[in-house]
Amino acid sequence: MEFSTSLSFFPTLSKPPLFHTSSVSISLHSCSRRNTRPLTEASGFSYQKFVHFALDETKRRTHLVSSPLKDNFITSIPMDGKTQLQILSFEAPKIRLLRSLCVEGNETMKVLDFAAFPKPEFDLPIFCANFFTTASTNIVVLDLNPLHDVISRRDYKEKYYKSLLPLGLKYAELLPWGGKITSESLRFFSPIVIWTRFSPSEFNYEVLYSAFKDYFKAWLDLMDLAGEEASDDQILHNCEAQHRYLAWRAEKDPGHRVLKKLIGEANAKDLVKNFLFNGIDELGSKTFLDYFPEYQCEDGTVNEKRSIIGKSFDHRPWDAAGEFVGNNFR
């Protein structure tokens, strides 16, 4: 994802007029020529309504309080003053960090990076929504990222994903697999992951909004049911699992290149490590290379490649029953 744009920081989130105010019922048979008309500009769409829905829904379920974490980043200097970077952060009894990064105001690019990280006392998946929009395309990852391995840990997969497979299948039809994805990235995804690319259209955006709402409500349902771990060993296991996830994302997340162009290298590194993937310094002491030694170069530095294994998946590597069918996965 290579582009040039600019941004300015806004610590609060306002509710702008939405590009479309009437509701759309999403079903597998609702697509037609009438409701797939293209939107010619990314500026005709806003991700802010996604964030407002998530915050409103979370407040209905739990006691959500503002986190001061965002205050550390509101003084970053934009590189052109045109694009808005809106950052929000919250905490709740079962949520270590619910945070949002929303990039808007630029006519050619919009970004939403929204995540909810559970406290280590709960082995909940991590809610993840990474959306990137330009005037010609949309790149989407939406998932309940597994805290533990869903390929080898059948008990964990069945505990959290078995009941959600119909939801995943519904949106797999509406938002088809987006093409090649590396084995390294796939190990952090679940059987219901939405990884897709689509052209801008009012209908596609409404499908995406519907998927976001359904997936987030599903995550909140899991949160409601989650019981606190009684075992210190299991809590430490959860800490390490989440720390490993954060280490991977902070080091290899492609969004860093976008932020670097927007706010400069130093600010981008700080935002990625200490806001987007906050917890690296608190949840564990291992380094990226401790978790992923195959990325170590001869001089001891981290290989900048995002794929060392070299295997990628052109098609969804899970079947309708949630069984992994990607042969020779490592």
Image (spheres, grey):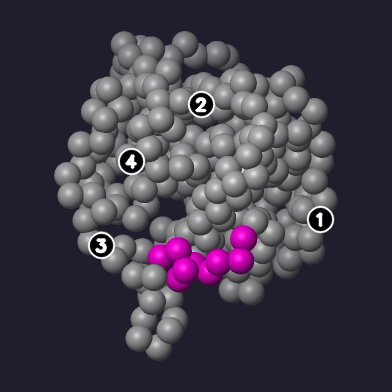
Tell me the amino acid under the disc marked 3: Ile
Residue 226 position, x and y percent, is: 62, 26
Q: Mark 3 points at which residue?
A: 309
Q: How far apart are marks 3 and 4 (CA)?
A: 19 Å
The answer to which of 142 and 96 lies nearer the viewer is 96
The mark nearer the N terminus, 1 or 4, is 1
Q: In which quarter of the image is residue 64?
A: top right
Secondary structure of residue under mark 1: helix
Rounded to the nearest angstrom, the CA distance separating label 3 from label 2 is 30 Å
**Percent from the top left, x then y, of residue 128?**
52, 40
Which stretch did the figure color magenta?
A: 284-292
Tag of residue 33? none
**Residue at 36 percent of width and 64 percent of height:** 306
Please name the residue that numbered disc 1 is placed on.
Answer: 71
Q: What element carries label 4?
A: loop
Residue hosting label 4: 152
| Front disc: 3 or 2 | 3
Q: Which amino acid does label 4 sit on?
A: Ser
Q: Earlier in the sequence, mark 1 or mark 2?
A: 1
Q: Where does label 2 land, which residue?
A: 215
Q: Do the residues under discs 4 and 2 have CB atoms within 8 angstroms?
A: no
Label 2: few (<14), some (14–19) or many (≥20) C-alpha neighbours in 10 Å: many
Magenta-drawn stretch contains 291: yes
The answer to whether residue 295 is visible is yes
| Residue positioned 82% across, 36% down in the render | 65
59 in relation to 145, above or below? above
Left or right, residue 141 beside residue 13: left
On screen, residue 243 above or below 167: below
